[in-house]
Amino acid sequence: MGRLIAFIILLIPGIMAAYGIKLMRDTLFNKLLEPYPALWMQFTLGTIFVVLGIGFFAGFLLNRDRKKGTVAKRFQK
């Protein structure tokens, strides 16, 4: 059960990052989606979603590797 919960926790930021990439791609092709009033806002929110999604995933991996002791000395606490 614990692994399923961890998978779901990692799945949510992955979906968020994928949606951010879709928003940025649609902006580059001048396709404005419904809830966004301007293309620049759509691109900015897409960038934020990508950075937060990848950042959460990277932080999760760093935390896991710190617990295992498999990170370089400069990344240890």
Image (tube, rainbow, N blue to C red):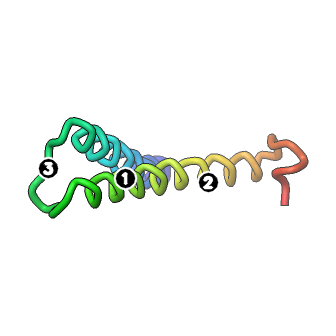
Name the quarter where the C terminus is drawn.
bottom right
Classify 10 Å Cα crowding around label 2: few (below 14), some (14-19), many (20 and above).
few
Name the residue furthest left. 34
Q: At numbered mark 2, what does the secondary structure look like: helix, strand or loop?
A: helix
Name the residue furthest right. 73
Residue at x-position 31% and y-position 44%? 24
From the image, tell me which residue sits under label 1. 12
The CA span between labels 1 and 2 is 14 Å
Check disc 1 and give the amino acid type: Ile
| In the foreground, 75 or 20 | 20
Q: Tag 1 or tag 3, which sits nearer the N-term?
A: 1
Where residue 36 sits, quadrant-wise, is bottom left
| In the foreground, 67 or 62 | 62
The CA span between labels 3 and 1 is 24 Å
Check residue 59 in the rendering and tell me which mark sits there, or answer none. 2
Check disc 2 and give the amino acid type: Gly
Residue 27, image x, y percentages: 24, 44
Residue 21, image x, y percentages: 34, 42
Check disc 3 and give the amino acid type: Leu
Dots 2 and 3: beta carbons under 8 Å? no
Residue at x-position 22% and y-position 41%? 26
Residue 48, image x, y percentages: 41, 57
The CA span between labels 2 and 3 is 32 Å
**Image side of residue 30 versus residue 55, left or right:** left
Q: Tag 3 or tag 2, which sits nearer the N-term?
A: 3
Check residue 32 in the rendering and tell me which mark sits there, or answer none. 3
